[in-house]
């Protein structure tokens, strides 16, 4: 089981497995994003080292089901779509402890035929990689974990590009949530780095599958451009008093 710890500095939510927390003292570590010192202790009633996972994605009107039952547990994504039932929620909640002190980022990859071309680049860039095999699994993972990078093929798992379930889950996310992730859509008909197509699809970058040989350079350029844009955008928010410096 895990406890969720929210950083007071950057507001990153970190999943800390209960069995990593000593029973007799707090666990102290640095936030993987802003390096702020954090501390977490076991709840007084967690003598067995096993606790319930965070159920924050479930509407307040829906009581959480006990973990020893097999009934469906509805998890809503930020887009309002209902996630499929989780046989064991622990399998969908990923640990943040592997990333503590490393400054690494997490990537969700929903690709069918191009993993052999994408994975070496992501490993070189030191991403912690999660590969999903279905839309159901992708929705579960996104409902319970935070990803810095999402790579999604427009036809993933046989989807119609106009009705891609994972894409539909991402589109309506609030801006504050969406700003924290970089979304790449891949396909056979895109013009790589076409900003208008990316804008129309509500993603940060579109990449034609034929250009995967240069994926590292393409990704770095697009991310640098995105960072530069949001530096200016955030300064504007601070200057207008809509966000604190």
Image (spheres, rainbow, N blue to C red):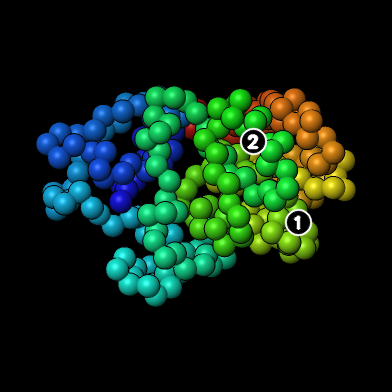
Residue 71: x %, y % from top left: 39, 75
Q: Position of residue 185 (x, y in %)?
A: 73, 46
Q: Which mark is residue 119?
A: 2
Q: Nearest the camera: 241 or 210?
A: 210
Q: Residue at x 60, y 55 (%)?
A: 133
Residue 79 appears in the picture as rendered: no
Judged left or right of residue 137, residue 68 is: left
Q: Which residue does the numbered mark 1 point to in the structure image?
A: 155
Identify which residue, 182 or 157, lies in the foreground: 157
Few, some or many residues within 10 Å of mark 2 (<14, 14–19, 20+): some
Query: In the rendered image, which quarter is residue 150 located in?
Result: top right
**Measured along the vertical axis of the image, is residue 166 above or below residue 37?**
below
Q: What secondary structure is found at the residue carrying circle 1?
A: loop
Label 2 or label 1, whichever comes before in sequence order: 2
Look at the picture and state if 198 lies above or below 127. below
Q: Quadrant of residue 108?
A: top right
Label 2 to label 1: alpha-carbon separation: 19 Å
Q: Can the viewer see residue 41?
A: yes
218 is higher (above) or lower (below) than 5: above
Front one among 226 and 3: 3
User: Residue, x 87% and y 41% (percent of image)?
Assistant: 191
Residue shown at 23% from the left, 38% from the top = 21
Q: Is residue 75 left or right of residue 48?
A: right
Q: Residue furthest front?
A: 116
Give the percent coordinates (x, y) of residue 163.
74, 64
Kindly indicate the quadrant of the structure image that contains residue 51. bottom left
Q: Residues within 10 Å of mark 1 (few under 14, many from 20)?
A: some
Residue 157 in the image: state x and y as whole percent: 69, 59
**Is residue 120 depicted above or below 3 in this figure?**
above
Task: Give the residue displayed 19% in from the left and 44% down from the top.
Answer: 42
């Amino acid at each position: 089981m895990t406890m969720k710890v929210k950083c007071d500095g950057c507001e990153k939510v970190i999943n800390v497995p209960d069995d990593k927390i000593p029973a007799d003292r707090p666990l102290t570590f640095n936030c993987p994003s802003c390096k702020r010192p954090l501390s977490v202790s076991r709840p007084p009633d967690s003598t067995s080292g096993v606790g319930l996972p965070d159920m924050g994605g479930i509407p307040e009107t829906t009581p959480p089901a006990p973990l020893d039952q097999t009934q469906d547990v509805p998890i809503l994504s930020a887009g309002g779509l209902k996630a499929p039932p989780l046989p064991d929620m622990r399998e969908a909640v990923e640990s943040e402890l592997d990333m503590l002190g490393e400054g690494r980022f997490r990537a969700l990859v929903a690709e069918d035929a191009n993993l052999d071309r994408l994975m070496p680049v992501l490993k070189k860039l030191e991403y912690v990689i999660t590969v999903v095999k279905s839309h159901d699994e992708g929705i579960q993972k996104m409902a319970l974990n935070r990803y810095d990078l999402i790579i999604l093929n427009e036809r993933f798992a046989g989807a119609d590009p106009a009705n891609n379930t994972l894409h539909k889950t991402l589109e309506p996310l609030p801006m504050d949530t969406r700003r924290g992730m970089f979304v790449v859509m891949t396909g056979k008909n895109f013009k790589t780095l076409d900003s208008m197509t990316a804008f129309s699809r509500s993603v940060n970058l579109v990449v034609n599958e034929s250009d995967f040989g240069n994926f590292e350079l393409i990704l770095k350029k697009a991310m640098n451009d995105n960072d530069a844009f949001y530096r200016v955008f955030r300064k504007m928010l601070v200057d207008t008093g809509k966000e604190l410096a």
